Image (cartoon, helix red, strand yellow):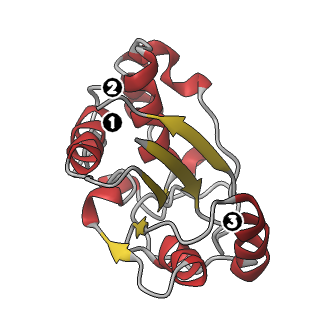
Amino acid sequence: MILHLVRHPKPRVAPGICYGRLDLEAENAGAVAARLRAELPPELPVWSSPLRRCRSLAELLHPLPVLDERLTEMDFGRWEGRPWDAIPRAELDAWAADVAGYAPPGGESPRLLQARALAFVAGLTVPEAVIVTHAGVIRTLLAHWQGLPPQRWTELSFACGSCTRVEVPR
């Protein structure tokens, strides 16, 4: 199965803010969609996170994208909407010490995010698709398929509006 993993366009949020599940508008979704339409094979089915920064792009790529909660970004709990530099250093250090297993207070761990993203992909029955989602979802999926240990997950970086093509064994 071939997946085109698309990270949403840049969200409208101040720099330095933790915004995992915040439902933010996207900037320049039209321009991103035009570029992607030129790159992607035509008429592929599109699945998307229901958050606006993904959904707005997905709707420009397909008249009826399928929204799926499992494609939503990691829940950062009490960190959501806060500046990264206002998050207690001890909590950030705990996350750095256990990249996959640490859950921010009231949130979820990257390992839980990975499990729901993998469950989504396991349920796909199409030979090729576009998935409009978030960096965390893309990162945890690729880390799994590449067999990366958690301490290397942060090496995977995806620009807003980028598309990563991957062939997933069935």
Residue 102: quarter of image: top left
Please, what is the three-letter code of the amino acid marked with disc 1? Pro
Amino acid type of the residue tagged 3 in the rendering: Lys
Where residue 36 sits: x, y (%)?
71, 65
Residue at image point 53% right, 50% down? 5
Where the N terminus falls, by quadrant?
A: top left
**Residue annotated with mark 1:** 110
Query: Left or right of 15: which side holds 118?
Result: left
Report crowding for label 3: few under 14, some 14 to 19, many 20 or more residues within 10 A (C-alpha).
some
Q: The residue tagged with tag 1: helix, strand or loop?
A: helix
Residue 127 in percent (x, y) is at 39, 49
Q: CA distance from mark 2 to mark 3?
A: 25 Å
N-terminal-most mark, 2 or 3: 3
Q: CA distance from mark 2 to mark 1?
A: 5 Å
Q: For the residue labelled by badge 2, is the local secondary structure a helix, a strand or a loop? A: loop
* Mark 2 nearby-residue class (10 Å; few <14, some 14–19, many ≥20): some
Vertical position of residue 53 compared to residue 155: above or below? below
Residue highlighted by disc 2:
100
Q: Earlier in the sequence, mark 1 or mark 3?
A: 3
